Image (cartoon, helix red, strand yellow):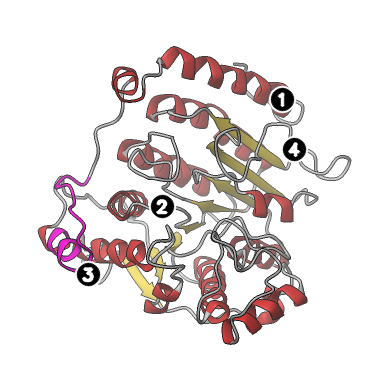
Amino acid sequence: MTPKLAYIFSDNFFQYDLGISHPMNRKRLVVAHKLMQELKIVESELSNVDIITPKKAEEELVKKIHSEDYISEIKRLSKEPGFNYKFGLGTNDCPVFPDLYETSMLIAGATLIAGEVVLEADYDYSFVMMGGLHHAFPNKAGGFCYLNDLAILIKKLQTQGLRVAYIDTDLHHGDGTQHIFYDDPDVLTVSFHESGQFMFPGSGYPDELGEPDKAEGSSINFPLYKYTHDEPYLHYFTKYIPTIVQQFNPDIVVWQAGVDAHQQDPMGHLLLSSFAYEKLANVMKSLAKQTSTGKMIVTGGGGYNPNSTSRMWSVEIGTLIEKKLPVQNPLPWIKFCKQYFQINLQYKLRDTPFTPEKILDLYSIDFERINSFNTKYEETFYDEVSKYYNIPSP
């Protein structure tokens, strides 16, 4: 039977715009949603995707994660932007913008609804393009994130007696979500990311395993050296993550499916292609099917090149719903992006994966150097994680 997906979407997501020159601007969402339309992933009688309009989260649910003072400050600044900012608000990463409170609450509500519909209706998966704000802490904004919609969702799932596996394949370590559940043995947080040696937020190392004597083994981190491409990335992910998730034995999977590890993204140094994202989506499908509910909630997370972000989200969702996507990008989408955003796009939907030879040519770094660092990371990972899980040796 063909999988069904709930696509949680509102035009009001476009209000989550941190500025025209800010990486988190409305362009990335407008362009991505347009591609979903042109590919007939959404708004098509032939599609097995339903668009569901979200509503704002109830403040009481948000307070399960965020402090009342922090929420009140976001609400105040939405109406009266000024000076004397606190809680990480008003920075270059997290500027104050009109309707910050309302838009943030809408995104939190969208991710909550994504959880509701997969459990209460006939959907295998749900997707919130604007969800996945994993850098928000209980009383601090960070990394373009104000409210941690993922944590709000997971806390709600826990009230339903569900054991949750949270898998984060964003470029950046999911520090906020990890912190919130660091002392909770019933939530597994897995983050697979570029090493904090090179990348914000500078955390996410294998020895971050959960609160000692309380939740050890509930936090899993695999950092990767810069310029890691598809082959080693997928090797490490498929070797370790499914085994760990299966042993944790969750009831449901939450996937932060950020695509800023793509080779064209300006924010980092990883070199993934569409092949890697398609493979990741298939692995995540398999993990979801093995849970007691068989369901998965997916959020868009990071991705800051409108071209690659649009295409990789489409590849991920197309893979989940088993839709055959064309070789070429739809011509109306290419014309739309050029006309309204002055973006010149490539004609092919998918990319050519990087090779060690191409990495050496472009970045003057030998693959053996990359591999030696990743091998060291893997050895450290094994030494730490094998204390809690039966995993293959390096």
Mark 1 vs mark 3, CA separation in Å:
47 Å
Residue named by callout 4: 209
Element marked by disc 3: loop
Element marked by disc 4: loop
Direction from residue 116 to residue 267 in the image, left or right: left
Mark 3 vs mark 4, CA separation in Å:
44 Å
Q: Quadrant of residue 153?
A: bottom right
Of the two numbered discs 3 and 2 on the same chain, state the one appearing first in sequence: 3
Residue named by callout 1: 386
- Residue at image point 67% right, 68% down: 156
x, y percent for residue 217: 75, 37
x, y percent for residue 198: 55, 35
- Residue at image point 62% right, 17% down: 393
Element marked by disc 2: loop
- Residue at image point 50% right, 68% down: 114
39 in relation to 308, above or below:
below
Residue named by callout 3: 44
The answer to whether the residues at label 3 and label 2 have Cβ atoms under 8 Å apart is no
Mark 1 vs mark 4, CA separation in Å:
11 Å
Of the two numbered discs 1 and 2 on the same chain, state the one appearing first in sequence: 2
Of the two numbered discs 3 and 4 on the same chain, state the one appearing first in sequence: 3
Q: Amino acid at mark 4?
A: Leu
Of the two numbered discs 1 and 3 on the same chain, state the one appearing first in sequence: 3
Is 391 in front, or is 107? 107
Mark 3 vs mark 2, CA separation in Å:
25 Å
Element marked by disc 1: loop
Q: Amino acid at mark 1?
A: Ser
Direction from residue 201 to residue 31 in the image, left or right: left
Q: Amino acid at mark 2?
A: Gly
Q: Nearer the viewer, mark 2 or mark 4?
A: 2
